[in-house]
Image: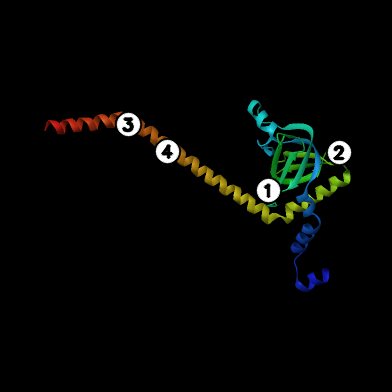
Amino acid sequence: QKLMDLISGTSKEDIRRRKFEQHLLPALQMGGSFELISCAKSCENSGGFLSSMTSMFSKPKESKGNEMIWVQLSSELATLEWQTLAKKKGSPLREGVIPLDMLSSVTPGDSARSLKLRSTNGETLIEIESESSKEAEKWTFALRESMVVLEREIKANANKKRGQRRVESRWLEMKRKKAEADAYKKKLGSTGMTYTARLMMEKDQE
């Protein structure tokens, strides 16, 4: 393979991606089980059974609790998805996503079996613990490689999110302007009707 790469002039980036796809990507997409040490609220959505219940009665904060979760790379290769192994009425108790464009580093955690995923502003997004230090090292390396090798997919997902935010922003602006227009019409409504009625009366008198 090395000889073929030399002959064909394959770039180092392409070789690195090929190795990633052969040796690391399958394991990331299959996923693995971890113990959840801590998770920032920004990385947990309200789809989980407990998440939706607790969000009704508590303020957003970092959640802690040693629960077993499943972590895997999404099909679009741009986000990490996680959910608790425990379920309630067919839904995981908690779940969330971590866009890879939010990640700045993947480092060892407080123990040899744990790893921390940090955001671009230094916040610990999630800390998880594997069943062995070897497994933790494997995932740390694989996630670090994904941040580099999957740059194209990560950027595409980030652009998609920005586009969605622009659409949402336009929709909210249109909704705001419509509400202002409706309020203005309502305010002028009685005055306009009175003026119209007076014109009709004057026409009848002629």
Q: How many residues crowd mark 1 within 10 Å: few (<14), some (14–19), many (20+)?
A: some
Q: Residue at (69%, 42%) from the top-left corner?
A: 97
Which quadrant would residue 95 be assigned to in this image? top right
State the mark number for residue 111: 2
Precedes in sequence: disc 1 or disc 2: 1
User: Could you tell me the amino acid type at mark 1?
Assistant: Asp
Q: Which residue is mark 1?
A: 101
User: Could you tell me the amino acid type at mark 2?
Assistant: Ser
Q: How many residues crowd mark 4 within 10 Å: few (<14), some (14–19), many (20+)?
A: few
Precedes in sequence: disc 2 or disc 3: 2
Which quadrant would residue 42 be assigned to in this image? top right
Between the C-alphas of marks 1 and 2, the distance is 26 Å
Between the C-alphas of marks 2 and 3, the distance is 68 Å
Instruction: Please tell me whether residue 108 is drawn above or below residue 204 in the rendered image.
Output: below
Query: From the viewer's perspective, is the residue at label 2 or at label 3 nearer?
Result: 3
Q: How many residues crowd mark 2 within 10 Å: few (<14), some (14–19), many (20+)?
A: few
Instruction: Please tell me whether residue 26 is drawn above or below residue 193 in the rendered image.
Output: below
Query: From the viewer's perspective, is the residue at label 2 or at label 4 nearer?
Result: 4
Q: How many residues crowd mark 3 within 10 Å: few (<14), some (14–19), many (20+)?
A: few
Please provide percent x and percent y for residue 164. 57, 47
Please provide percent x and percent y for residue 143. 77, 49
User: Could you tell me the amino acid type at mark 4?
Assistant: Lys
Find numbered disc 3 in the image and state the secondary structure of the residue it sits on: helix
Label 2 close to label 3 by CB (< 8 Å): no
Q: Is residue 68 left or right of residue 173?
A: right
State the mark number for residue 178: 4
Q: Is residue 143 visible?
A: no
